[in-house]
Image: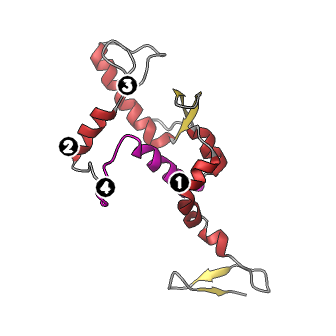
């Protein structure tokens, strides 16, 4: 059983700089545990604490995941999106950004964690931010100060006094 983890940090070196990156803990902890167990089996002992997470048998870092990721997507039958667009390892970055924004993460905090600018986040994911903030963008108060309540139809709201 996976123990709940508060925060998971990675030290990454990207195109822009080296930095700490915070990962969503629950799902990431599960997969890191699996990788760690497989590596322990492979070595026949506990791996060094400062070893790369994704490494070759002798501990050298894996420099490129393109071919392996493509093979995985082919085997799963999801190499192309419903629009026919080929998925790449970079697609994971877009998925991550979209999910974080949909969860209400600040554009400024997300940009810093991803090593990019708020301008780039706005340009590529602005539509996501608007959907996430729809309730905030459309709220209004009646004269009594209460917020409108949703009716059975999602597009209708009525004011409750």
Secondary structure category for the residue under label 2 = helix
Q: Nearer the viewer, residue 145 or 84?
A: 84
Q: Residue at x 66, y 81 (%)?
A: 148
Q: Residue at x 56, y 40 (%)?
A: 114
Is residue 25 positioned above or below 11 on the image? below
Q: Residue at x 37, y 14 (%)?
A: 59
For disc 3, the marked residue is 36
Q: Quadrant of residue 38?
A: top left
- Which residues fall within the magenta stretch? 82-104
Q: Position of residue 105 (x, y in %)?
A: 60, 51
First in sequence: mark 3 vs mark 2? 3
Q: Position of residue 15 (x, y in %)?
A: 53, 31
Q: Residues within 10 Å of mark 1 (few under 14, many from 20)?
A: few
Is residue 142 positioned above or below 110 on the image? below
First in sequence: mark 4 vs mark 1? 4
Q: Would residue 71 be found to the left or right of residue 83 on screen?
A: left
Counting labels gives 4
For disc 2, the marked residue is 75
Marks 4, 2: nearer the viewer:
4
For disc 1, the marked residue is 124
Marks 4, 3: nearer the viewer:
4
Taking the magenta stretch, the answer to whether it contains residue 93 is yes
First in sequence: mark 4 vs mark 2? 2
Q: Quadrant of residue 89?
A: top left
């Amino acid at each position: 059983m996976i123990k709940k983890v508060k925060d998971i940090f990675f030290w990454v070196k990207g195109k822009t700089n080296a930095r700490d990156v915070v990962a969503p803990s629950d799902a990431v902890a599960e997969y890191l545990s699996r990788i760690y167990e497989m590596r322990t089996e492979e070595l026949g002992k506990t791996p060094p604490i400062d070893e790369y997470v994704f490494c070759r048998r002798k501990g050298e870092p894996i420099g490129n995941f393109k071919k392996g990721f493509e093979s995985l997507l082919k085997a799963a039958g999801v190499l192309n999106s419903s629009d026919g667009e080929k998925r790449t390892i970079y697609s994971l970055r877009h998925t991550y950004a979209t999910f974080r924004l949909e969860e209400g993460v600040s554009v400024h905090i997300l940009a810093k964690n991803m090593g990019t600018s708020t301008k780039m986040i706005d340009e590529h994911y602005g539509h996501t931010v608007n959907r996430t903030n729809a309730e905030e963008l459309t709220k209004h108060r009646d004269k009594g100060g209460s917020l409108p309540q949703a009716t059975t139809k999602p597009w209708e709201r009525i004011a409750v006094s």
